[in-house]
Every structure is written in structure tokens, then in C-alpha cells.
Image (cartoon, rainbow, N blue to C red):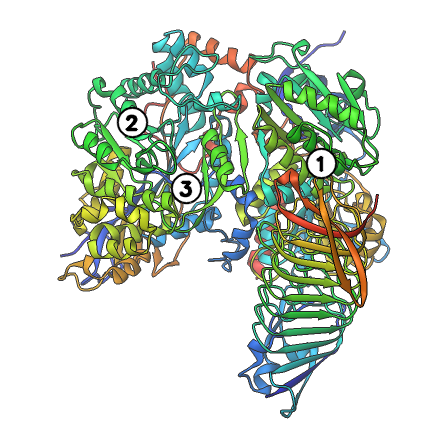
């Protein structure tokens, strides 16, 4: 069977002469991968670089061609980021935490990432304007504001990080219950989750609200997670490719039982059971990998806790009227009881949730581990024996309380394609970019995974090696990488949503916050299209 | 009777200090500056410098004892010649130009296998080093404006060096939870009584180079509730006890630090100690610290270099891979050890600002100076590359002292037939890439 | 066993000689040695461009030995990452001598520049004159400096000696600069004369012995006395614990605290 590509799309028949022919016999041909949650660009990533020169000193890759500079591991330079994703066979990536005030910075870095199509999610869970509008019940105006601020920052969707807790952290406090009132704002985290999920549906964004739950990382948080998901149950499903009303990001970090680090245990059964019996939730794993990494999140209070636990380095960087953030280096250790449980939780979720279309493989790069570890996760999912080999090496107390050993399910290759391509693409509303079909965007990765007649999961070493370096990565019909070596320069598009609206009420609202509370002018807050690499608005540029 | 043909108001971002005030309004009359609103005297001076007669106007190349005028292409060609034949060129400056120019500079340095360093190396570099050692608890300036009830200025002279800092971001600003300065307290810590010190609720005069001991003692008082058993002679315990009381009462505190902390004594240790103190204070209430960066885009230079190479300044590409080791790859150390044979200065004046001992090492080195204004560096240069003034005559992007990116705008169209830093560097990069 | 003599021809600018290491030299012929990569400025050279290379027949030495004659501060990275053998430097040595070293021995008949023995984990460095800053220290960002091995300095050292040291021993016969054992985690530093200001500051663990005087940070609290004999002399040392500001458990034993 031949796959034909011309002018960047799959075609039935090629019109031009002398096409390039790739012999992919006995190879595995997949659509380009989609990573819907990876912190690869922007202010906090650069602060991570500033915090850890040692990482960039020790890791040099792709450093010697032309003016391209590649250093780093958890926080690779933009060039390296594009190369590594491309080598892995990916085509579209999502930066999931952009503070609106610093969106310009995110775009500046994203411009330097070759090959990939980029999307980014806007941090709105602690936004004053949003919290005020919810408190004042001006919900129509809230819709307009969300469209405007997405447009102003040229971002794609809504991200809520520990809603309300960032505002509390601005006073050095945190919020532990989603029914607790946010200091100085007469609303609760639940109000934010509900209202933004509703707004998201109303204004027709292409992807659901992405939620980083309150109490992330803490023992016993699975209850908060389920409560948060229940909050939006009655909103029904969304129209369009992505029916989900809420996307639970790095679910692993939100699925714990216990009431202290000593009684810490897995809440994966409860969370998976909820997801299995409800159709409005999608999620990604946030699988941890036993290694050293640089954790970074807008959940400032959690990062402070993590700093207190590790006693190491800590950066905090709160952004006025919008969000908190923190960065802490961390090492996940096999022999650490909590880490070993965390490792199991991620895989348990992936194996207990029945419908692969509901989930995406991520490590919450770089929080659980780096994205180049994805092939290892695939091997764990496809091969029970390979999981057992890791289980043998983990903390012995943890080994005896996790349920992972009792799960027999092994992913088929087809299911792994869903959780690394089709499902994340569908959740993000870019399904056509990860489909091999006539007229669709030609993004392909070709892998050598051994004898395709046999069970590919059987030999995890071969599988990991093969998935780690695609023979070919074809982006928009161009061969951009061959056997892990960049072939030509190419820049993907940047998708964004939202639009401008002439409403006087909106102008008045936004102007007020800029006059009273922001320290920049409104016109300088707006990222111009010229500052964005190949901008594509998936909604209307002007709305009524 | 004067007929006004064309009077327009343009919004501007002030390209002077790290405050990067973006509310400046310039009224132009027939393309000339008529008035400037919302700028401080320093910003006004910078914006007005567009009309100054003291400008570099010509592309010059040294020939014997004279400099002869050449075309832009000849100047670019000769610049490429010198850069390509250098054994280890250093490209220095970058804090008074746009991020776009900084990126091109890094690419040029990478191709040449040279060194890229910026003025951070001689001002707040110690803050970057301390951040790499232990991290910095920080926030954007709006957090201070809206929340801070205690503001500490340490080793900085805001009213003289950052005149609008008080009004826009700190003591005199109005915010959501702190509506006026009656609800804020201020502590100033400095070696001399600055004008800000006279407005402060508490002024602590410290002895020169005693900051590390002062911070350590304050940390001890805050952590243990009492002064240390062995008291450092340089420190006034009563002052610090009073300060500790104010500090512990605050709900949201900030320490703004300047060159008085970063460049005196063991600057980097001062900041290690300060960051450690701020971490401690976060156990009681909310505390952040923000550097008082000098040049308007010195923060951008660190950010751009960090994301492009992994390192914030002093990046040595001589082995092909970026290498960063302050104390070795910083301009002062490189010149001191005779490591470089060519100095290209972009939007900076190393010969006028570096210590004399280091400047004397540049004798015999080839010097290329790219600058809108004449300086001791352009005076000594083998090649002078005049440019437009970034932020006044051309635009771009810059980062404020707290890492907020803000667009720079061309305020007026220059009558000079010159290129921007970005355009000129692009030509040089193209020439070098082509020649290699 | 072989002995290689490298005579430095001199150079006005630093030369990176990270390949001068017994582990690299071991299995190479004289011809191969001559072609070893050396860097200076932004160019790559061969070892023979900067050195006269001679080989001596096996003599008494049990391990492979490299002798560098006419060495100056411009030779950077001598013995970097070495894990075996012996290097004798006649003259001064530049920055990063024995950095990341794992084993073997380096003797310098002269002084060394900064970052000597930085992040080393084993082996022995013996400096017959003085050392610079960051002796046995970490590189920027790393949380651990020297982790094992021994550095002996017959003369004095500058600032940040043993910064973030996490194991091994440093012995300094004369004075040290300021911030001795800054952020130190483990291991032992002995200074037979005096050290400068902020000795042991931000120390988490480990031991610093000072047979002369030093100024120590405010976070150290006196916990007792310690009696030792050094070179036949009996010394009474005051023992301090800290740095309490960092909740540290390090120990400074010192004859006299200076103001």
C-alpha cells in the first residue's frame, strides 16, 4: 500500500513529477504525535534555565550546526526542543501554562521551536477580572472577556491551575477545599471551575477547560479531584470534535489517598471509576519517570511545600492580578515510598480507564519527567512483564500496597497510537492534524519497531529504541528529520482562539483594570500577530 | 502667526532604566518632539537625545591615525573581516538594545565561536549567580503595587536612579489592597542617607561592605527571635531589632535591591544571604525580592541568552558548545587574562565603564563599536558603526526589571540615514554566514 | 610503564589541555600523542603545536606518569576527569586542574589558578605553592563540590575554598581567604594557619579545623572545646556548630576567633 503526499496533504494521486519515494516496508507508519501538556516555553521555563545552569552544562546536544544552540534536559533550548520532539515523531505540542502578562515571552520562545505546530493554554484560574465578574454575576461579560484575553495573548484555550489558590498564595496562604472562599473575593474555586467550563462551552473553544486540581500533590487529594469533576457534570457535553467538558491535567498528581506522607497511597481506582462512569472528562497521565528533573507550575503554594520538603533551590514568581508560579528541582527515586506509589498511580490510571480516547500520555514535562521518556511509558503500557521488572526495583513497602501488579491489561499498538496521537488531537480539537486520510495535513512518523508480524510489545528494549528515534518525521509533507538528524528548517503554525469585540462594556471593564491594577498599558499587553510564528485563529477574529 | 501643520501624540516605552515605563506620551509637531508627558528627567533626556548633535553619524574605519568614512556595506564587510579573523572575539554590551538585536548577537557569537557577554557581568550578574545557587522568591511589580505593606530598598537609590519607581510600582503607587502610602511602611538600608531614606519609616545606615553581616544578623534575629551571641562589630543590633519587628508585622513585603548589594563586598554572597532571608520570611507571611535593574533591557539580555543557550550572560562558544563560568568567561576575567583579541561593543561603553586595569588590556586589541552616541569606546574603535536609537527611533521588545516583556516603539522617524541595531546585525550575520 | 615529558613552548593566551591525562595517554603511541586535540582561542590544535613531547623508557614509577615542564597559568584543564596515573607539573598550572578527577595523583611544583580539584570525587592533588579561588569547589549551579579525594596545599588559598564540599579532605598549610567551606555539606578542611571572614558560612555539615584564627559567621554557636596535637604542639580548639541560619550541623574547630 502506498501513502501519497503532495503540497503538504495526503492525496489520492500525485500530479507532480519525480516524487521522493520512501520505502517503509516492515516499518510502522503513524500520524505525527500530539503532546497536549508539556512546559516547553515561556517565563517559567527560562527561570528554570536560570535556576539550573548545571543541567545545561552537562547536556549538550545538536550543538554544532550553524547558529543552532542545543543545551539542556528538563528545559531544553527552543531549537533542541523542536529537534527532540521531531526525533520522537511528534508534530503538535501544547504549552499549558501561559500567564497573560507574559504571553509575549512564551511566543518569543515558541518562535524559535522548529517543526512543531504549537498551541498554548492561558492561566485564568486566579485572574482578578474573572473572579470579580463571577462574584458580580456578570456572566455574559465574562464570556466576552475570555474571548478577548485569549485573543490578546494569542493563546488557544483555558487552563485553571489550583483555582483561587494562586490568589491565596499571593498572601502566602493556600486553599485546601474547593468550597473555601478565596481571600478578598467572595467566591470559591468551585465557582471558577463551573463558570469557566460553562463559558468555554458557550463560546465554543476547541478544547475543554484544562484543570490542574486544588491540593495537587497532597495525600488524600483524589476526593478534591472527584469533587472538582462533579462540579461540571450537569453542563452536558460540548459540540465539535472534543465532546469533553473538562480535561484533568496530569491526573497522576491528583489521585492520591491517605492523610499524610506515611499513609500515602493510590487513589487511581476511585478516579478511574469516576472517569469510566462519566463521559464529560478527559485526562492526561502526568506519569513520573525515576530521574532528576526541574518541576515548574503555576501552583505556587505547592512548589513552596515541595521546596520545604527538599530543602533545595526554589524560585517563586507571581504575576500581578493573574497567577502564581514556582520552580523546584526534584529527583524521583525508585526507593522512595511516595515516589514509587506516584509511579504506579500514573500507569494504574492508564490501565484502569477503559476508553483510550479519554486519555493522553504525558509526563507533564518536565514535572514528572522529560518528554523523551514517552517510549518507556508505552513499553510499560504494552508489556506487563516490563512493568514487573520495574516493580521489582521499587520501594518494598510501596510494592506491596499498589494494585498495579494485579492489572493484566496490556495496550495494543493501536491503543498506544490513540493515546499518543488521536486522543490528544481530538481533545485539543485538531483531530485532522493527526489522521492519515485524503486531504488531511500530512504529518507522519515512520518507525522501525522490529518484526511487525510479531507482538511489538514483546521486546520492550527494541520498542523503546525504535520509538525514541523515528526513521522519518514528515511534517506538512516535508521530510524534516531523518534518523534523528534534522534535514531542513521548517516552522509550524501557532493556533490561537478568541477575538476582539467592540462592546463598550468590555472596553470599560478592561480599561479599568489596566488603569487601577496593572503596571503596563493595555496596548502593550496585547500580543500582535506579527510577534507570533504563523498565527492561525481557529475562531472568528471579531465577534459580536 | 505660527500655523501648526501636524501635531500628533504617540505612546512610548521609555528606553532608559529597568522601570521601562510604558505610559510615556510624546507630542510630535511636524515629526519633531514638541513635548514629553509622564517621563522622568532621565527618560526625557534619553528621548530628547534623538535630536542631539552629539551622535555617531558616519560609518568609520581606522586608517593609520585617522578614521575614514565608508559606506555601510564597506563597514559591514570590514567588520566581518575582523570578526572572522579573530582568535577569540568577545561581543559585549546588549543591555541598551532590543531582544531582537540580542538574539542576532548570540547567533553571530555562536558562528564565530566567540564570547557573548552583557553588562550584567558588571552589575547584577551576582544576582544571576545567586539564583543558580539557591533560587529567588520574586514577583512582578504589580504584586507590590497591589499588596505590599512593607517595602525595603536595600543598596539602591530609587529616587535618583529609577525616579518613577516609587510612583508607578511601589511606595507612592495605589493598588487594590493598599490604596495609598499611608498604608505602606518603608525601610531603607544603605551606606548613605539617600533621598528615599529621608522618606522612610526606618533608615538603617550600614557600614560599607558590611551587608552580608547585616543580612545574616537580621536573619538570626528573625529566625530565633534574638540577636546572635557573637555580634559583628559592624552591625547596629538595635536598628535590626526594630526592622525585624516591622518585617514580622508585614502581610506582604518586598526587598528591592540595587548595586549597593550586588557589587560591594562579596556581591554574590550578599544575594545568597538575602534570598535565604526571603525564603525564611515566607514562613511567616508573603515576601518577594526584585532587583533594581539599571539599563532598560538588561533583563531581556539575560532572558534571551538563557533561552537561547541555557545561560544568562558570559556565554563562551569558543569550543563550539556554549560554556558559562562567571569568573572565567566574564568580560573582566577574559580581558584580564588576555584571552580575547577582538572586542565588539554593541550599545555599551566598556572602555568608559570597566575598571582601568582591564581597559588597559584592550590596547592592541581590535575594537568594533556599534553605538548611536560617541563614547570612549567609539573613540578608540577600529570600526565605528552608528545606529538609530533603539526605543526612540526604532522599536523591538524589551523586558522590565521583573521580567515582564514590553514592546519598544519607534517614537519618531529619524532624519539620519542609519540602520537599527537589528538591521545592522542582520547584515553582519548574513555576511559572516556567507563567508563561512 | 611509560613516562611522558611534555615541555610547554609557551603561549600568550590560555590553552585548553583537557587531554593531558594519563587515562587518555595510556594506550597511545608517541605519534598519536602528538596529534591529541588541544584548543586555544576558537581553534583546535594538536598537542605538538604547543609542546615538545618526549617519552622515557619504563623506570621506577609503577603507574604512567606525565611530566609537564615550563608550565604556566595559561595551561587550563590539566588532568581534568583523570582517573589513574600521575601528573607532575613543573611550574604553575591554569584553571580547572584536576577538575572532576576520579583517581590518580597530580603534583604541582608551583601555584594553581581557580577551580583546582572542582567537583573531584577521588585521587590526590598536591600543590607545593599557592592555590586560587574555588579550590575543591562546585561549578555554578551544582549542589556538590568536591566529593572525595585529597587536596594538599603547601602555601595559601584564596576565597571560597571547599565551597559546597561534600566529601574528601582539603589541607592548607598557610592561610585561606574568605568564605572558607561556604555551603559545605560534608568532608573535612584543615587550615594550619588562619582564614578570612565568614568562615563556614551557610555550612550544612562537615568539619573545618583552623589552627590559627578566623572570623566566623553569626550563625555559629559555641558547643565546647577540643584538644589536639599538631606537629608536636598541643592546641586547644574552640568548637562551634552551625550555620544555624541554614539549620546546619557543621562543625568549626578553631584556636582563636578573630573579630
Q: Point out which mark residue A301 bears.
A: none
Q: Quadrant of residue A185?
A: top left
> Do the dots labelled 3 and 2 sit on one chain?
yes
Around disc 3, counting alpha carbons within 10 Å, would you say few (fewer than 14), some (14 to 19), or many (20 or more)? many
Q: Point out which mark residue A223 bears.
A: 2
Q: Quadrant of residue B119?
A: top right
SS state under label 2: helix
Q: Which residue is mark 3?
A: A367
N-terminal-most mark, 3 or 2: 2
Q: Is residue B95 visible?
A: no
Please, which chain is the residue tagged with disc 1 on? B
SS state under label 3: loop
> Do the dots labelled 1 and 3 sit on one chain?
no
Q: Is residue C126 left or right of residue A290?
A: right
Please, which chain is the residue tagged with disc 3 on? A
Q: Which residue is mark 1?
A: B216
Could you say where residue A349 lies in the image, as x and y percent from the top left?
A: 24, 40
Amino acid at each position: 500500500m502506498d501513502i501519497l503526499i503532495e503540497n503538504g496533504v495526503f492525496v489520492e494521486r500525485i500530479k507532480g513529477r519525480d516524487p521522493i519515494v520512501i520505502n517503509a516496508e516492515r516499518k510502522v507508519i503513524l500520524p505525527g504525535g500530539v503532546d497536549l501538556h508539556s512546559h516547553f516555553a515561556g517565563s517559567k521555563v527560562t527561570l528554570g534555565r536560570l535556576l539550573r545552569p548545571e543541567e545545561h552544562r552537562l547536556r549538550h546536544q545538536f550543538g554544532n550546526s550553524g547558529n543552532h544552540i542545543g543545551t539542556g534536559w528538563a528545559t531544553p533550548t527552543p531549537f533542541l526542543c523542536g529537534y527532540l520532539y521531531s526525533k520522537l515523531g511528534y508534530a503538535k505540542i501544547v504549552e499549558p501554562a501561559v500567564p497573560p502578562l507574559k504571553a509575549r515571552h512564551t511566543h518569543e520562545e515558541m518562535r524559535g521551536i522548529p517543526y512543531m505546530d504549537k498551541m498554548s493554554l492561558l492561566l485564568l484560574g486566579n485572574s482578578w477580572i474573572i473572579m470579580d465578574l463571577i462574584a458580580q454575576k456578570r456572566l455574559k461579560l465574562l464570556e466576552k472577556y475570555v474571548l478577548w484575553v485569549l485573543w490578546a495573548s494569542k493563546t488557544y484555550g483555558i487552563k485553571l491551575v489550583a483555582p483561587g489558590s494562586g490568589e491565596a498564595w499571593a498572601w502566602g496562604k493556600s486553599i485546601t477545599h474547593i468550597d473555601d472562599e478565596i481571600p478578598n473575593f467572595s467566591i470559591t474555586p468551585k465557582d471558577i471551575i463551573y463558570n469557566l467550563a460553562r463559558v468555554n462551552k458557550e463560546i465554543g473553544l476547541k478544547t475543554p477547560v484544562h484543570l490542574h486540581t486544588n491540593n495537587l500533590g497532597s495525600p488524600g487529594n483524589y476526593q478534591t479531584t472527584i469533587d472538582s469533576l462533579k462540579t461540571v457534570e450537569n453542563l452536558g457535553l460540548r459540540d465539535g470534535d472534543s465532546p469533553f467538558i473538562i480535561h484533568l491535567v496530569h491526573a497522576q498528581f491528583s489521585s492520591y489517598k491517605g492523610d499524610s506522607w506515611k499513609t500515602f497511597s493510590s487513589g487511581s481506582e476511585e478516579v478511574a471509576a469516576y472517569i469510566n462512569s462519566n463521559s464529560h472528562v478527559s485526562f492526561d497521565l502526568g506519569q513520573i519517570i525515576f530521574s532528576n528533573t526541574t518541576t515548574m507550575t503555576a501552583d505556587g503554594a505547592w512548589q513552596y511545600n515541595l521546596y520545604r520538603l527538599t530543602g533545595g533551590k526554589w524560585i517563586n514568581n507571581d504575576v500581578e492580578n493573574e497567577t502564581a508560579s514556582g520552580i523546584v528541582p526534584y529527583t524521583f527515586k525508585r526507593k522512595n515510598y511516595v515516589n514509587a506509589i506516584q509511579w504506579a498511580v500514573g500507569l494504574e490510571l492508564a490501565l484502569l480507564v477503559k476508553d483510550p480516547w479519554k486519555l493522553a500520555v504525558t509526563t507533564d514535562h518536565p514535572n514528572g519527567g522529560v518528554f523523551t521518556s514517552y517510549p518507556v511509558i508505552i513499553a510499560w503500557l504494552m508489556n506487563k512483564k516490563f512493568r514487573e521488572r520495574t516493580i521489582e526495583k521499587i520501594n518494598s513497602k510501596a510494592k506491596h500496597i499498589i494494585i498495579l501488579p494485579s492489572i493484566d491489561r496490556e495496550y495494543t499498538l493501536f491503543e498506544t497510537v490513540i493515546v499518543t496521537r488521536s486522543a490528544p488531537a481530538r481533545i485539543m480539537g485538531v483531530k485532522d492534524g493527526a489522521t492519515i486520510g485524503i486531504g488531511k495535513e500530512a504529518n507522519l512518523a515512520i518507525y522501525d519497531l522490529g518484526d511487525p508480524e510479531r507482538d511489538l510489545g514483546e521486546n520492550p528494549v527494541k520498542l523503546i529504541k525504535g520509538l525514541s528515534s523515528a526513521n522519518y518525521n514528515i511534517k506538512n509533507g516535508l521530510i524534516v528529520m531523518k534518523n534523528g538528524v534534522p534535514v531542513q528548517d521548517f516552522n509550524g503554525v501557532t493556533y490561537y482562539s478568541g477575538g476582539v469585540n467592540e462592546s463598550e462594556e468590555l472596553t470599560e471593564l478592561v480599561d479599568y483594570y489596566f488603569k487601577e491594577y496593572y503596571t503596563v498599558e493595555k496596548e502593550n499587553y496585547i500580543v500582535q500577530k506579527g510577534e507570533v510564528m504563523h498565527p492561525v485563529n481557529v475562531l472568528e477574529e471579531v465577534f459580536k | 502667526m505660527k500655523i501648526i501643520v501636524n501635531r500628533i501624540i504617540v505612546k512610548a516605552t521609555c528606553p532608559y532604566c529597568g522601570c521601562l515605563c510604558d505610559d510615556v506620551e510624546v507630542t510630535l509637531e511636524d515629526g519633531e518632539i514638541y513635548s514629553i508627558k509622564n517621563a522622568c528627567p532621565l527618560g526625557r533626556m534619553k528621548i530628547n537625545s534623538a535630536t542631539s548633535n552629539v551622535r555617531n553619524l558616519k560609518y568609520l574605519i581606522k586608517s593609520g591615525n585617522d578614521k575614514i568614512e565608508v559606506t555601510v556595506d564597506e563597514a559591514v564587510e570590514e567588520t566581518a573581516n575582523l570578526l572572522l579573523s579573530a582568535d577569540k572575539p568577545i561581543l559585549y554590551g546588549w543591555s541598551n538594545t532590543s531582544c531582537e538585536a540580542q538574539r542576532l548577537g548570540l547567533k553571530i557569537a555562536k558562528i564565530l565561536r566567540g564570547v557573548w557577554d552583557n553588562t550584567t557581568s558588571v552589575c547584577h550578574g551576582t544576582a544571576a549567580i545567586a539564583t543558580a545557587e539557591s533560587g529567588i522568591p520574586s514577583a512582578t511589580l504589580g504584586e507590590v503595587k497591589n499588596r505590599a505593606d512593607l517595602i525595603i530598598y536595600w543598596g539602591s537609590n530609587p529616587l535618583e536612579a529609577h525616579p518613577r519607581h516609587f510612583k508607578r510600582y511601589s511606595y507612592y503607587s495605589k493598588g487594590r489592597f493598599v490604596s495609598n502610602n499611608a498604608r505602606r511602611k518603608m525601610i531603607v538600608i544603605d551606606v548613605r542617607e539617600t533621598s528615599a531614606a529621608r522618606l522612610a519609616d526606618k533608615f538603617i545606615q550600614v557600614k560599607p561592605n558590611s551587608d552580608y553581616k547585616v543580612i545574616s544578623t537580621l536573619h538570626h534575629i528573625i529566625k530565633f527571635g534574638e540577636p546572635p551571641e557573637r555580634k559583628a562589630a559592624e552591625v547596629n543590633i538595635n536598628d535590626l531589632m526594630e526592622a525585624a519587628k516591622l518585617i514580622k508585622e508585614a502581610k506582604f513585603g518586598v526587598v528591592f535591591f540595587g548595586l549597593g548589594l550586588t557589587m560591594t563586598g562579596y556581591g554574590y554572597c550578599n544575594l545568597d544571604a538575602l534570598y535565604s532571608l526571603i525564603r525564611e520570611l515566607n514562613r511567616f507571611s508573603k515576601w518577594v525580592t526584585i532587583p533594581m535593574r539599571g539599563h532598560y533591557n538588561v533583563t531581556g539580555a539575560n532572558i534571551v541568552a538563557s533561552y537561547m543557550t541555557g545561560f544568562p550572560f558570559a556565554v563562551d562558544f569558543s569550543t563550539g558548545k556554549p560554556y558559562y563560568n562567571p569568573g572565567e568567561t566574564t568580560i573582566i576575567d577574559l580581558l584580564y587574562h588576555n584571552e580575547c583579541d577582538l572586542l565588539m561593543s554593541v550599545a555599551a561603553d566598556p572602555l568608559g565603564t570597566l575598571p582601568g586595569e582591564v581597559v588597559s588590556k584592550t590596547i592592541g586589541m581590535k575594537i568594533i563599536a556599534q553605538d548611536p552616541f560617541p563614547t570612549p569606546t567609539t573613540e578608540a574603535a577600529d570600526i565605528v558603526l552608528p545606529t538609530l536609537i533603539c526605543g526612540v527611533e526604532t522599536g523591538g521588545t524589551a523586558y522590565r526589571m521583573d521580567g515582564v516583556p514590553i514592546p519598544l516603539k519607534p517614537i519618531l522617524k529619524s532624519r539620519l540615514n542609519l540602520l537599527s541595531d537589528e538591521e545592522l546585525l542582520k547584515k553582519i550575520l548574513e555576511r559572516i554566514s556567507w563567508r563561512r | 610503564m611509560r613516562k611522558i615529558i611534555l615541555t610547554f613552548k609557551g603561549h600568550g593566551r590560555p590553552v585548553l589541555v583537557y587531554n593531558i591525562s594519563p587515562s587518555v595517554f595510556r594506550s597511545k603511541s608517541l605519534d598519536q600523542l602528538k596529534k591529541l586535540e588541544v584548543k586555544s582561542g576558537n581553534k583546535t590544535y594538536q598537542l605538538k603545536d604547543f609542546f615538545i613531547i618526549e617519552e622515557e623508557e619504563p623506570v621506577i614509577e609503577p603507574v604512567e606518569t606525565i611530566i609537564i615542564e615550563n608550565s604556566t597559568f595559561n595551561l587550563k584543564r590539566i588532568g581534568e576527569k583523570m582517573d589513574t596515573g600521575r601528573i607532575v607539573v613543573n611550574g604553575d598550572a591554569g584553571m580547572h586542574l584536576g577538575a572532576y578527577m576520579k583517581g590518580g595523583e597530580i603534583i604541582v611544583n608551583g601555584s594553581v589558578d581557580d577551580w583546582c580539584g572542582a567537583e573531584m570525587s577521588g585521587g590526590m592533588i598536591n600543590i607545593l605553592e599557592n592555590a586560587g579561588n574555588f579550590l575543591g569547589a562546585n561549578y555554578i549551579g551544582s549542589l556538590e563540590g568536591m566529593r572525595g579525594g585529597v587536596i594538599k596545599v603547601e602555601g595559601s588559598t584564596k576565597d571560597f575554598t571547599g565551597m559546597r564540599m561534600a566529601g574528601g579532605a582539603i589541607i592548607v598549610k598557610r592561610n585561606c581567604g574568605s568564605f572558607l567551606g561556604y555551603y559545605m555539606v560534608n568532608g573535612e578542611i584543615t587550615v594550619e594557619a588562619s582564614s578570612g571572614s565568614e568562615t563556614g558560612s551557610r555550612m550544612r555539615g562537615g568539619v573545618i579545623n583552623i589552627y590559627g584564627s578566623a572570623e566566623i559567621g553569626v550563625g555559629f554557636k559555641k558547643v565546647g572545646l577540643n584538644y589536639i596535637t599538631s606537629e608536636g604542639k598541643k592546641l586547644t580548639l574552640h568548637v562551634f556548630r552551625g550555620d544555624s541560619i541554614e539549620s546546619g550541623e557543621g562543625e568549626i574547630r578553631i584556636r582563636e576567633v578573630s573579630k
